[in-house]
Image: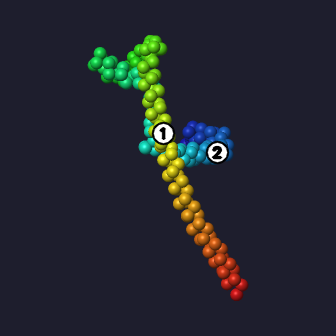
Amino acid sequence: MKTGKGKGAVKRDTKEALKPVDDRKVGKRKAVERKGKMEKKAKKDPNKPKRPPSAFFVFLEEFRKTFKKENPNVKAVSAVGKAGGEKWKSLTPAEKAPYEAKAAKRKTEYEKLINAYNKKQESSADEGEEESEKSKEIHDDDEESGQDDDEEEEDDDDD
């Protein structure tokens, strides 16, 4: 009977021997840190106004309608996008002007909306700060009473 080690066991031993133990620990820490960073990412506010479309996307809204009428069989979104991109590149600056004007108009409307939104957020943040100050005052009172209890316990120990 042969009592030799299998090839699998030898490979595992050599791989583990080549890797320092510290490297494995650092790798685990990095993985944990990444999870923490992902959780800290702020959630998007559904009430925040959406950014306005660029001139190209304003053009694409109209182009999509005409493209679907001309090519009813083509249902791939990528095909519409590619055709729209080629058409946009072939337009002259004079032909692009109305789309750029519409985009500029939408941008000014967006700026008004976002300013109103930001003011609303600031006012709600101010209200939140007032509440937190009140909770701090209550918390301070608790700490002071806790210190008095510690002193009384010390006096009891002396007896």
Q: Quadrant of residue 55?
A: top left
**Residue 2 at x, y = what percent?**
57, 41
Q: Give residue 29's position: percent from left, percent from top.
A: 61, 47
Foreground of the two, 20 or 25: 25
From the viewer's perspective, is residue 46 above or below residue 144? above
Q: Which mark is residue 26?
A: 2
Under tag 2, what secondary structure? helix
Mark 1 or mark 2: whose residue is earlier in sequence: 2
Q: Please tell me which residue lies in front, 124 or 154.
A: 124
Which class describes the residues within 10 Å of circle 1: few (<14), some (14-19), or many (20+)?
some
- Compared to 18, does 66 lie above or below? above
- Which of the image's four quarters has the N terminus? top right
Frontmost of labels 1 and 2 is 1
Q: Which residue is mark 1?
A: 114
* Residue 72 visible within the image: yes
Task: Pick out the residue farthest to the bottom.
Answer: 159
Q: Amino acid at mark 2?
A: Val
User: Mark 1 is on which residue type?
Assistant: Ile
How far from the left and from the top, in percent, is residue 99?
Answer: 43, 21
